[in-house]
Structure formats: structure tokens, C-alpha cells
Amino acid sequence: MATVVISFKVMPESPDTDLEGMKSKIDKEVRKFAALESDEEVRIEDEPVAFGLVALKVMFAMDEKRGGTEPLEKAIEKIKGVNSVEVTDVRRAVG
């Protein structure tokens, strides 16, 4: 099986949402879902949208045998302050 790189865009409910708290909870959910070790990177970056609203871009790699991302998307949607989760890219890693 190959390694896949997955990217999500997470939209908060409002510009006042605690993004740092969301980042911590998203990181925890991604690590649990993808069975990542503490030294494996989960990249979460701010992406300004408009009028003070900032989306979170989440990117990580996992073994494709773990399956689809729907359970992870649902877990992230349950985090307080999250408005929506969108998979923006899934591709096999080369090398």
C-alpha cells in the first residue's frame, strides 16, 4: 500500500472562534484517525478568507490502507467552533 497526502480546509463558525484550541483538537483527531506517531507531522496553517475570518488548512500523510476520510471529517465537524470541513486534495506520495 502507498502513502497518501491529504489536505482539508476547515472553516470556523466566526472570526471570534478560538483557532488555537481548534488546531489542538484537530491535530488530536488527525493523529488518532491516521495512527500517526508524535514525531510525524500534521501541518495546520492559517488561511485568511475575508472580513477577519480565517480558515485552517490541514495537511498530513497516512497509509492508504486506513481507508477513506469520512470518519475523520465527521469527527472534526463535531469540534466546537467548526462550521465545515472540506477535503481539498488527496494524492499518493511519490518516493
Image: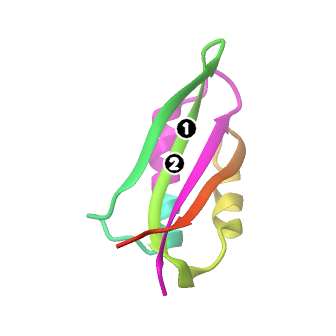
In reply to whether residue 10 is colored magenta, the answer given is: yes
Residue 78 in view: no
Q: Secondary structure at mark 2?
A: strand
Q: Which residues are magenta?
A: 1-27
Query: Total marks drawn?
Result: 2
What residue sits right under mark 2 in the picture? Answer: 58
Query: Measured along the vertical axis of the image, is residue 52 above or below residue 63?
Result: above
Q: Amino acid at mark 2?
A: Val
The residue labelled by disc 1 is 56
Residue 29 can be seen in this image = yes
- Rendered location of residue 39, percent (x, y): 26, 64
Name of the residue lying farthest toward the top? 51
- The percent coordinates of residue 33 (x first, y second) are 53, 70
Which x, y percent locates residue 54? Answer: 58, 26
Q: Are marks 1 and 2 in contact (CB under 8 Å)?
A: yes
What amino acid type is highlighted by mark number 1?
Answer: Leu
Q: Residue at x 68, y 69 (%)?
A: 71
